[in-house]
Image (cartoon, rainbow, N blue to C red):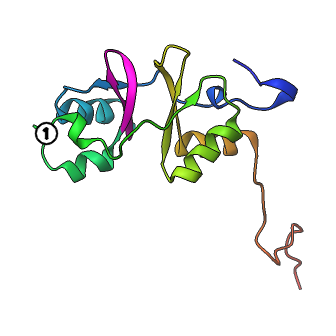
Amino acid sequence: MGSGPHGALRAADIATRPALAVERGDPACHAEQLMRVHRVRHVVLTEGGKAVGMVSHRDLVAAAGPSVGVARAAGHGGLLSVSEHAALREAVDVMLDSRVGAVPLLDAGGHAIAVLTRRDLVRAMVERGWGEVSRPGASSAPPSSA
């Protein structure tokens, strides 16, 4: 792994690996169990091993019931994804424009290799010291003793 051209960070550099997946015919309780065991809130929905959608914890709660099929629990039609080689900015733009909390990174064959989440973005910001800001009007100098 590493940075893309000109040092630009790739989505794959910070994304959660491996991508956890459930098959379209699996019961929703399987997706819920994967999320609980791995402490994630999104899994990739697959058909024949290829990504076809995403299922979030919120989707499962809205579907109401562990016996519901995971395809019914999927929150939206169609697959929002980015290439495993996508720049981080491209992946973030997809997430923001589509108002989703995660996006799978796909290889050329349509298989999910990782999932980029909001949590991954926050963790990268903290680890890299991005966004170090102070409150408006706050001084970086220690308070003086009067």
Asked if residue 46 lies in the magenta stretch, the reply is yes
Query: Please, what is the three-letter code of the amino acid marked with disc 1?
Result: Val
Please provide percent x and percent y for residue 142. Answer: 86, 69
Q: Is residue 43 visible?
A: no
Asked if residue 29 lies in the magenta stretch, the reply is no
Up the image or down, 35 lies above or below 107; here it is below
Residue furthest bottom as drawn: 146
Please provide percent x and percent y for residue 31. Answer: 26, 32
Residue furthest front as drawn: 78
Up the image or down, 15 lies above or below 95; here it is above
Quick one: label 1, few (<14), some, or many (20+) residues within 10 Å? some
Locate the C terminus by quadrant: bottom right
> At x 56% / y 46%, what residue is drawn?
95
Q: Quadrant of residue 92?
A: top right
Q: Is residue 92 visible?
A: yes
Residue at which label 1 appears? 68
Q: Give the camera-side residue of 32 and 8.
A: 8
Residues shaded magenta: 41-54
Q: Quadrant of residue 125?
A: top right
Name the dominant secondary structure of the magenta segment.
strand
